[in-house]
Amino acid sequence: MRAPHATDPAASRGRLWPEPLSTFRTEFQRDRDRIIHSSAFRRLKHKTQVFVEHEGDYYRTRLTHTIEVAQVARTIAGALGLDIDLAEAVALAHDLGHAPFGHTGEDALAELMAPWGGFDHNAQAVRIVTGLERHYAEFDGLNLTWETLEGIAKHNGPVAAPVPAALARYVARHDLELDTHASAEAQAAAIADDIAYNHHDLHDGLRAGLFVEAELEGLPLVGAALAEVDRRYPGLAPMRRRHEALRRVFGAMVEDAIAVARARLRAAAPASAAAVRALPAPVIAFSPAMGAAVATHRAFLFGRLYRAAPVMAERARVGQVVRDLFTLYLEAPHRLPADWQADVAVADGPGRARLVADYVAGMTDRFALLEHARLLPAAAAR
C-alpha cells in the first residue's frame, strides 16, 4: 500500500524535454530502465569499488556494489510504502559519476580540476544523465524525471554552497531545489549505500587477507553476530561462519533503518512527498546506537582496508595514471577520440578541461591502464 508521503509517478514534475507517457511503465520505471541501458551503467562493471578491477574476480566492482545498493533500497522502500521504482532508479544511478579507480580517481580529478570548478562524482552523475549520454534523437542525456534527477543530485542531503560547478550549470536551467532534503525514496537509496559498503567491504577485506575474523570480534555488530553464530552452529566451517555472521550484520543495519524511519514518519506525519522534503532532518537514518556502531566499523575499515599498505601502494600508482592521462589530453587534445575532439575544438579553457575530465572519468580501470600504457609507455614502465 502506497504511503501518503510516497512519491507518486503519476504526479511527477515531468522531464526537461516533454515526452509521451509509456504504455506499460510508470515514469520511474522508465527512468530505471534508461539507467540500466545506459553506457555509463555498463562501464561500472570494470570500475573499482576498493580493489582495482583486475585484482580478483571475487571483489566488488562498482556494478556489483550498485546492484546490492538497489536491492537494499527496494527492501527499505517496500517496507515503508514508498515508490520502489524511484528508490531503485536513484540507487542504480548513484555511482554513475565515479572515475576509474574509485575514490583515488575522483581525488586525482578533483585536484586537477580545482582551477576549473572541481570534480564531484554526484555532480558528474547528473552531468552524465543530462548530457554525456548521447543516444536519443531529440535530446542529450537520458531525460530523466525531476524526481530521479533530484535524488541523484542530493540523495546524501541538501547540497551546500559552493555547489559543484558541473551541477550548478544544470540547475541553472532546471531547478532541483538543492537546499531541501530529497524524497524518502532517495533517502532510502542513500542509507542503502551505507549499508551495502559497510557490509561488503568487510567481506572483501577478509578475502584479501588484510584482517581476520578474530580482529572483528571487538566491533559491536560483528562481534555480537559471530557470538550468535557460534552459539547456534558450533564448529561451523570458517567460510560459512563468516557468511552467517556478516549477513546478520547486514540484516541488523536494514532493520534498524526501517524501524527508525517508521518512528520518524509517525512523528512527523508528512502528508506528501513535498512535506518530506520540507522536514528539517532526514526521515531515514540509523538510530544513535546503530550510528555509533557503524562509525566504529568505518573507522576500522579506514585503517585496515582503505589505508592498508597494499591498497595505498596501488592507489599511488593508479592515481598517477589518472593525472598523466588528464595532463596529456589537456595538452594534446588531438589524442582524444575524433568525436571528443570536435567538442574540445570549440570549447574555452575551462570548457576544454571539463571535457577532458568527462572523458577520463568515463574510463574503466582496464581501459585507463591500457591507454596509459599505449600513450605513455615510458611513464607506464616506471
Image: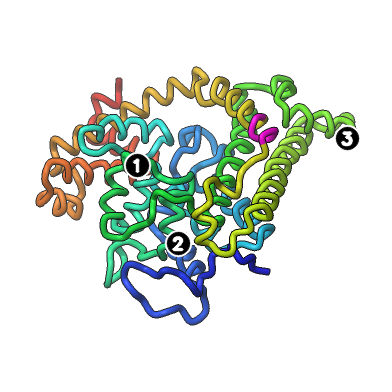
Q: Residue 203 location in percent, x, y?
A: 64, 34
Q: Residue at 66% of width from left, 46% of height from top?
A: 257
Classify mark 1: helix, strand or loop. Answer: helix
Q: Amino acid at mark 2?
A: Glu
Do the residues under discs 1 and 3 have CB atoms within 8 angstroms?
Answer: no
Nearer to us in this view, 85 or 327: 85
Which residue is label 1 attached to? 367
Is residue 366 shown to the viewer in this render? no
Which residue is label 2 attached to? 147
Q: Residue 228 location in percent, x, y?
A: 84, 33
Left or right: 195 as drawn, with respect to 219? left
Which residue is label 3 attached to? 233
Quadrant where the N terminus lies?
Answer: bottom right
Query: In this rendering, which labeled residue sits more in front, label 2 or label 1?
Result: 2
Work out whether mark 3 precedes mark 2 in sequence or the reverse, and give the earlier one. Answer: 2
Left or right: 77 as drawn, with respect to 100? right
Q: Amino acid at mark 3?
A: Tyr
